[in-house]
């Protein structure tokens, strides 16, 4: 019998009843990882030797998982999918990895990402593109591409990613799985390679909401190695996941889900996605939620994505200044330290990453700071204040995770369109304010998965998980793996 | 349009170079991004807002005591350096 496409509860039960051993589970996951590697490219490194800490018995003991290749793993190659780190072997563990190890979870491999987590396509890793398990001609999205694909393929029941703009929630949507990013600071970022520190979150992929709660319960807590980590709230999120939700209030942003607001409103995919969204809203009402549409200034909504780009590129430019190829990383040739660094960085970064760095540099130039960098921070405050105001009345924001299905490789996007600026990029609100945010599968358009996203008040991860669990229960898309894979 | 020279200067400040064709892609990308940035300027009252640098006000942040622990060994620190000599990272002579 196969187990890797099962839920954590089902695998736990099989382990506890001695129907299966963790050795056999690891072998199954390892075999699947190898089987799908050439076709989908989920992993940078597949572990062929099982490592396991048996000192603690937890819900995750003996259960295999994947870890994005931008988390430090002592003694295991960690490349961030970049040529400049292609041989880098960390000498310390990220707190997330350490906690999972202590919980007995078993690492299957390090997953492919967009280089340095700076992308949303899964096409910029130094080891090649990641393909969508539902349709190989399409992207899975990024940056946590390999983790999303590994869970969607049923290689592992869960995989860890990181989310700076939407890097867990968007690929989860395109892969037909659950993607959760808890409150900023809920989980330590120690050992996660920084992209944009004020926006970076740890997140993960599962095939149902309850599994996401199990993982949060294991990973949360204050870490003295990350001064931004939150003190533990003492709650066990899995215990309140089935709480009554009658009377809970959700809102959606009217302007963003009104077809008439989009130039390409005759696009059948967009039409169908929005139609399905309204069906989900009706379903939420049926199970006891109150749901209302709320207006937010479109100028502010249109400014979300450019503000995200300004803040994230500026922070990334600074964070990645440590990649010189001298104390670690691929070294360049040269007659001076400067030449060595220059060549290491010229040869070590791909074009896309360099473009983002140059953009960050432009934004930080003295003459541009006011118009570009500081204005972006002002937009950030305006939208976060607006959200917090709305959260006084509502328990959560519900939105389509994306305006359509996973794009095909090579698809062109109009990056000045309202659809792109708002519908494809509203998830950054969750990063701007550090709000807990989850995407869950909500159906299909043209045979490909679509998804809804629920974002809640900061620190109220339990409420977000509870609301998502209740909606998931009615939607009936839980525990799915990509059709045709099995 | 931003000149190629200016972009080359930004890149060199960041200690890397790009292919000529890549600068051209960057130029057209910048046009879009700067147009997107113009959207920000259209928001009413934006100049009166205090820029936000962090998701929320942190009350819990506490600096730990400055106590040495879990330090890396010299071997660990040097483990990923490509050239090492006398327990130090080797680089070309700085003073000729």
Image (tube, coloured by chain):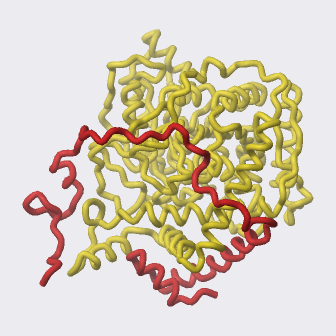
Chain colours: A yellow, B red
Q: Position of residue A120 (x, y in %)?
A: 59, 57
Q: Residue drawn at (37%, 47%), measured in percent from left and top?
A: A45
Residue at the farthest left position: B86
Q: Is residue A258 left or right of residue A395?
A: right
Q: Position of residue A126 (x, y in %)?
A: 42, 61
Q: Split into 4 quadrants, where in the image is the C terminus of chain B?
A: bottom left
Q: Is residue B12 left or right of residue A309?
A: left
Depth check, front residue: B72 or A5:
B72
A107 versus A240 height, above or below? below
Q: Position of residue B43 (x, y in %)?
A: 79, 66
Depth check, front residue: B48 or B9:
B48
Residue A27 appears in the picture as rendered = no
Q: Is residue A339 left or right of residue A188?
A: left
Q: Position of residue A463 (x, y in %)?
A: 69, 28
Depth check, front residue: A59 or B55:
B55
Q: Residue drawn at (45%, 54%), measured in percent from left and top?
A: A194
Counting the numbered discs, the total is 0
Depth check, front residue: B22 or A312:
A312
B19 versus A465 height, above or below? below
């Amino acid at each position: 019998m196969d187990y890797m496409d099962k839920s954590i509860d089902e695998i736990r039960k099989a382990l506890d009843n001695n129907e299966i051993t963790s050795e056999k589970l690891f072998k199954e996951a390892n075999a699947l990882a190898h089987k799908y590697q050439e076709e989908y490219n989920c992993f940078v490194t597949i572990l062929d030797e099982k490592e396991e800490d048996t000192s603690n018995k937890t819900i995750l003991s003996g259960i295999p998982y994947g870890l994005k290749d931008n988390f430090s793993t002592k003694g295991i190659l960690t490349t961030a999918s970049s040529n400049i780190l292609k041989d880098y072997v960390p000498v310390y563990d990220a707190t997330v990895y350490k906690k999972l190890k202590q919980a007995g979870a078993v690492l299957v491999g390090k997953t492919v990402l967009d280089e340095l987590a700076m992308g949303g396509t899964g096409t910029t890793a130094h080891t090649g593109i990641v393909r969508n398990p539902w349709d190989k001609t399409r992207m899975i999205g990024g940056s946590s591409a390999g983790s999303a694909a590994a869970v969607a393929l049923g290689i592992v029941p869960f995989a860890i990613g990181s989310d700076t703009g939407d890097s867990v929630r968007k690929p989860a949507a395109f892969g037909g799985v659950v993607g959760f990013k808890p409150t900023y600071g809920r989980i330590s970022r120690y050992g996660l390679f920084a992209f944009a520190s004020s926006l970076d979150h740890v997140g993960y992929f599962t095939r149902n909401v309850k599994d996401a709660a199990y993982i949060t319960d294991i990973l949360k807590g204050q870490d003295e190695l990350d001064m931004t980590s939150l003190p533990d709230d003492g709650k066990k999120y899995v215990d309140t996941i089935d709480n009554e939700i009658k009377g809970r209030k959700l809102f959606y942003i009217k302007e963003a889900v009104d077809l008439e607001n989009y130039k390409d409103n005759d696009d059948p995919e967009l039409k169908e996605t929005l139609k399905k969204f309204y069906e989900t809203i009706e379903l939420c009402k049926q199970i006891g939620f109150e749901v209302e549409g709320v207006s937010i200034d479109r100028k502010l909504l249109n400014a979300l994505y450019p503000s995200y780009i300004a803040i994230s590129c500026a922070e990334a430019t600074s964070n990645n200044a440590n990649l010189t190829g001298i104390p670690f990383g691929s070294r360049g040739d040269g007659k001076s330290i400067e030449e060595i660094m220059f060549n290491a960085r010229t040869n070590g970064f791909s074009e896309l990453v360099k473009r983002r760095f140059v953009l960050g540099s432009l934004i930080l130039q003295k003459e541009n700071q006011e118009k570009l960098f500081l204005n972006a921070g002002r937009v950030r405050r305006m939208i976060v204040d607006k959200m917090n105001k709305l959260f006084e009345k509502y328990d959560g924001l519900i939105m389509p995770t994306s305006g359509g299905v996973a794009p095909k490789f090579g698809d062109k996007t109009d990056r000045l369109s309202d659809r792109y600026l708002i519908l494809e990029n509203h998830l950054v609100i969750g990063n701007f304010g550090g709000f807990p945010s989850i995407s869950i599968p909500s159906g299909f358009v043209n045979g490909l998965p679509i998804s809804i996203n629920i974002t809640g008040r900061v620190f109220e991860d339990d409420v977000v998980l509870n609301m998502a669990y209740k909606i998931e229960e009615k939607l009936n898309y839980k525990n799915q793996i990509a059709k045709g894979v099995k | 349009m931003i000149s190629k020279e200016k972009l080359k200067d930004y890149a060199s400040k960041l200690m890397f170079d790009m292919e000529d064709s890549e600068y051209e892609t960057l130029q057209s990308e910048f046009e879009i991004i700067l147009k997107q940035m113009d959207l920000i300027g259209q928001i009413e009252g934006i100049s009166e807002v205090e820029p936000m640098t962090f998701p929320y006000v942190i009350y819990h942040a506490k600096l730990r005591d400055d106590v040495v622990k879990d330090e890396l060994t010299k071997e660990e620190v040097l483990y990923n350096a490509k050239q090492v000599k006398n327990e130090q990272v080797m680089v070309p002579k700085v003073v000729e």
